[in-house]
Amino acid sequence: QRLAQIKQELATVGGRLATFEAGMVPPARVQAFLEGLLARRSIELLGLKTLPVTQVGTPGSTEPAGAKGKAVAADAAQAGGDGIYQHGMEIRLAGSYNDLLGYLAELERMPQQLMWNSVSFSVEKYPRNVMVLRVYTLSLDRNWLVV
């Protein structure tokens, strides 16, 4: 009876993980996803680089932002799988304040999500601004696209 209960809990956790992962941008599509948003704005791409893959919840790794990401990481640990991996990118953009703000707003409205790690903003020479945005997605797959 206890074994059946544990199997049911494991199936529930697996379902939650699959649902969460389906809502995130797949690691192999992050670059295309970010560049696709640029096509609709007058923003200049200054740089795009991948960040090292880290396993969520291991010493030295960055915890996911928000309670939802932490709950999913806890579920992965409970499920006893390989874990959840954080796949990050840093993107440097230049443009007007309104265009950069619009880019961020559109990024937030997309049906598939990326999580933000950090954003920095500086005025290079009015009206040109530079924004450095670090985003990441979570996946059960360690494989990552190298740019």
Image: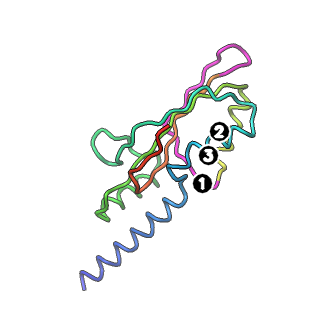
| Quadrant location, the N terminus | bottom left
Q: CA distance from mark 2 to mark 1?
A: 14 Å
Left or right: 93 as drawn, with respect to 96 = left
Characterize the magenta stretch by its predominant secondary structure: strand
Q: Which mark is drawn over residue 11?
A: none
> Which residue, given by chain and number where applicable, does mark 2 sit on?
104
Q: Nearer the viewer, mark 2 or mark 3?
A: 3
Q: Amino acid at mark 2?
A: Leu
Q: Label 3, on which residue?
A: 33
Q: Tell me whether the residue at label 3 lies in contact with that at label 1, contact meaning CB atoms closer than 8 angstroms.
A: yes
Front position among marks 2 and 1 = 1
Residue 130 is drawn in which quadrant?
A: top right
Q: Residue tagged by mark 1?
A: 112
Residue at 70%, 25% (x, y): give it: 95
Q: Which residues are magenta?
A: 111-129
Report crowding for label 1: few under 14, some 14 to 19, many 20 or more residues within 10 A (C-alpha): some
Could you tell me residue 83's position as x and y percent?
A: 34, 56
Which numbered disc flags the more N-terminal residue, 3 or 1? 3
Looking at marks 2 and 1 on the same chain, the residue that comes earlier in the sequence is marked by 2
SS class, disc 1: loop
Q: Residue at x 34, y 74 (%)?
A: 9
Foreground pick, 141 / 115: 141
Measured from the top left, where is residue 115 in percent x and y?
A: 52, 45
Residue at (57% x, 28% y) in the render: 47
Residues at discs 2 and 3 in contact (Cβ within 8 Å): no
Whether residue 29 is in magenta: the answer is: no
- Residue 54, image x, y percentages: 36, 43
Q: What amino acid does circle 1 point to?
A: Gln
